Image: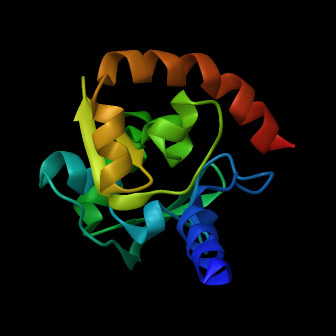
Amino acid sequence: MLLIAAAIFVAAIGGAWPAKAGELVYSSWGSAIKGYDPVAYFKAGKPIMGSGDHSLEWKGATWKFASAENREAFAAMPEKYAPQFGGYCAWAVSQGYSAKIDPDAWHIENGKLYLNYSKSVQTTWAGDIPGNIAKGEANWPKIEAKLAK
């Protein structure tokens, strides 16, 4: 029974381990935001899976888009649409480490996209959005430097 509980615990936190070195933009199999269209969060107000037919390379990751129009919008102003903190979990960054994300756990604050590990983690992060953004902005340069190694 103890082994089962330990296995469940390890599986539950497995995705919260720090990202691999060299990944300045969180990607899953090379695709930023696990293949979701970053522009869609702003234009459609929801996550939409992108397509390899509408993709581009930026900051070492492949970004996929639902349409050529969204790809062109991103190409013109990537910083406007790209998620903050390299697309890593905003809560994790506010706490001083990096973690993967769930594309469905998202929030736009002051025109910037923030992603989180899960919807439950996002609920915690949302308890103090301005404070957590400020902590994340303070922590991000150190985390980014570690990821670059």
Q: Identify the residue shown where x is 37% and y is 39%.
A: 114
Q: Nearer the viewer, residue 44 or 142?
A: 142
Q: Position of residue 119 (x, y in %)?
A: 30, 54
Residue at 45% over, 36% down:
84
Q: Is residue 39 left or right of residue 97?
A: left
Q: Quadrant of residue 80?
A: top left
Judge from the rendering whether residue 78 lies leftward or rightward of residue 4; answer left or right: left
Q: Is residue 61 above or below residue 99?
A: below
- Percent from the top left, x then y, of residue 53? 38, 80
Position above or below: 89 against 103: above
Q: Position of residue 109 (x, y in %)?
A: 25, 28
Quadrant holding the C terminus: top right
Q: Is residue 58 visible?
A: yes
Seen as rendered, the residue at the extreme left is: 44
Residue furthest toward the right?
Answer: 149
Instruction: Give the quadrant of residue 138.
Output: top right
Quadrant (top left/top right/bottom left/bottom right) for the N terminus: bottom right
Q: Does residue 137 sit above or below 120 in this rendering?
A: above
How did the renderer colour the structure?
rainbow
**Nearer-the-camera pick, 20 or 76:** 20
Q: Is residue 43 left or right of residue 131?
A: left
126 or 23: nearer the viewer: 126
Query: Can you give x and y, in whole percent of width and height, for residue 139 in the image?
Result: 63, 23
Residue at 24% x, 36% y: name it: 108
Q: Residue furthest front?
A: 1
